Image (spheres, grey):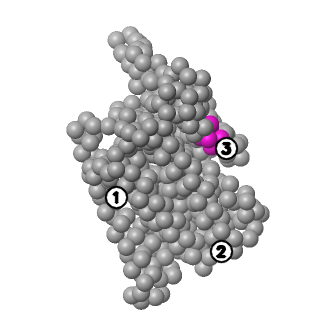
């Protein structure tokens, strides 16, 4: 879900390089919620997971068909919107992409603050009569640490840092398996078959792991042999799905019904493997925040007159975005709820509905046939998932349930 993590190339990327870039682009912090998503849905959630993976892979293939027919025009997601729907299409595509990235950047602050609160509970700081306790304190501290990263606009350096974040995710996966095998939890069968009330939110959380379609035009145009893009798509989705299944099933088997919204919060703090995973989970958001916020800041800069496009203005825009992000993170209660909103709103729009609409507009010359019914089914699935997911997330927030 990080369209900034891959930069537009000159068409020189090999198949394997593109495959790595796509795997890294889709592999985000949403993976930490997968065991929880499975725990609130039960084992039936695996069928939902497979369905979500297949639908998102299918919409990625639809998007590729659109790009293949318009190679010279579709250099970005906004260009795809322009080609299909004109200027308004470009604006809408850029807007929903920026919203997805900005919500994801807020989730990174929540992720760090909740993990720090787990490591150092009951921490309070007084500034005169102002009291900053636990979550708010850690959110502000995290924002201060992130501040220097905003001064760099060198995408190559930022991409390298983000690559370390991807490596960190695999460290957490290994630590989870280590905890399951050595710390007394074991691989216990304390799991339920199905929980109908958790189906909607579970589906939304699954969607966050497959919502990276915004990066596909950039990846497509960076490839030397664009005819191999379908192979890259299928291989990348397969690899990511396997990793996701290992985390979801492994975490659920280890912790069962006690699985926390972030799998790292289940790790015993005294275990060496747990400490490595917990501190690694703090580094991942720090490495990914600049890449998430840069496209949002760039979109704002593009709307400014030329005389305002200076380095100082760029820094000010990023600083203001960080302040707003911090304020929202301070008062938004739950990491998993925000991730569910990202899935049911942003990912549904960018990864399900947008590719289908673009295909019908650009390549949908066929009348009422099997492919049309398939695309219509995906649109209905996306709308139902988005509406029900948002409803239950808001319902839980109103009633104070995380």
Per the rendered image, the range of residues in magenta is 165-171
> Separation of disc 2 and disc 1 at Cα?
33 Å
Among all residues in the image, which is located at the extreme bottom? 367
Q: Position of residue 95 (x, y in %)?
A: 45, 57
**Residue drawn 41% across the image and 87% down it:** 369
**Residue drawn 66% across the image and 54% down it:** 21
Question: Is residue 7 found inside the magenta-colored segment of the image?
Answer: no
Q: Is residue 267 left or right of residue 76?
A: left
**Residue drawn 29% across the image and 56% down it:** 388
Q: Secondary structure at mark 3?
A: helix
* Residue that carries the numbered disc 2 in the rendered image: 72
Q: Which mark is residue 69?
A: none
Q: Magenta segment, principal secondary structure?
A: helix
* Residue that carries the numbered disc 3 in the rendered image: 163
> Separation of disc 3 and disc 1 at Cα?
31 Å
| Residue 369, placed above or below residue 116 | below
Whether residue 137 is visible, yes or no, is yes
Marks 2 and 1 in Cβ contact (< 8 Å): no
């Amino acid at each position: 879900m990080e369209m900034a993590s891959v930069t537009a190339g000159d068409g020189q990327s090999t198949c394997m390089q593109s495959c790595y870039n796509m795997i890294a682009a889709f592999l985000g912090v949403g993976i930490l919620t997968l065991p929880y998503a499975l725990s609130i849905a039960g084992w039936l959630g695996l069928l939902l997971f497979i369905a979500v993976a297949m639908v998102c892979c299918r919409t990625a293939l639809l998007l590729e068909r659109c790009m293949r027919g318009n190679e010279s025009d579709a250099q970005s997601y906004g260009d795809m919107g322009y080609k299909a729907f004109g200027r308004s299409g470009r604006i809408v595509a850029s807007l929903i992409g920026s919203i997805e990235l900005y919500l994801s950047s807020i989730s990174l602050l929540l992720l760090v603050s909740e993990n720090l609160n787990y490591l150092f509970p009951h921490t309070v700081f007084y500034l005169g009569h102002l009291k900053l306790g636990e979550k708010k304190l850690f959110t502000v501290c995290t924002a201060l640490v992130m501040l220097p990263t905003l001064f760099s606009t060198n995408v190559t350096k930022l991409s390298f840092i983000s690559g370390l974040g991807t490596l960190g995710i695999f460290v957490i996966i290994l630590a989870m398996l280590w905890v399951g095998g050595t710390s007394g939890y074991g691989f216990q069968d304390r799991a339920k078959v199905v929980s109908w009330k958790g189906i909607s939110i579970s589906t939304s959380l699954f969607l966050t792991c497959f919502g990276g379609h915004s990066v596909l035009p950039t990846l497509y145009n960076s490839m030397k042999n664009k005819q191999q893009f379908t192979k890259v798509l299928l291989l990348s989705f397969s690899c990511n799905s396997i990793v996701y299944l290992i985390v979801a099933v492994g975490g659920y088997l280890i912790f069962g019904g006690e699985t926390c919204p972030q799998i790292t919060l289940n790790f015993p703090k005294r275990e060496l493997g747990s400490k490595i995973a917990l501190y690694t989970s703090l580094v991942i958001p720090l490495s990914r925040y600049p890449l998430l916020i840069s496209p949002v800041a760039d979109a704002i800069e593009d709307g400014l007159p030329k005389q305002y496009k200076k380095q100082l203005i760029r820094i000010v825009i990023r600083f203001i975005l960080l302040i707003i992000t911090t304020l929202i993170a301070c008062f938004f209660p739950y990491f998993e709820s925000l991730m569910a909103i990202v899935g049911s709103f942003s990912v549904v729009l960018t990864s399900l509905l947008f590719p289908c609409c673009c295909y019908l507009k650009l390549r949908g010359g066929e009348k009422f046939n099997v492919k049309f019914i398939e695309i219509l089914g995906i649109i209905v699935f996306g709308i139902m998932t988005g509406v029900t997911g948002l409803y239950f997330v808001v319902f839980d927030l109103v009633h104070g349930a995380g």
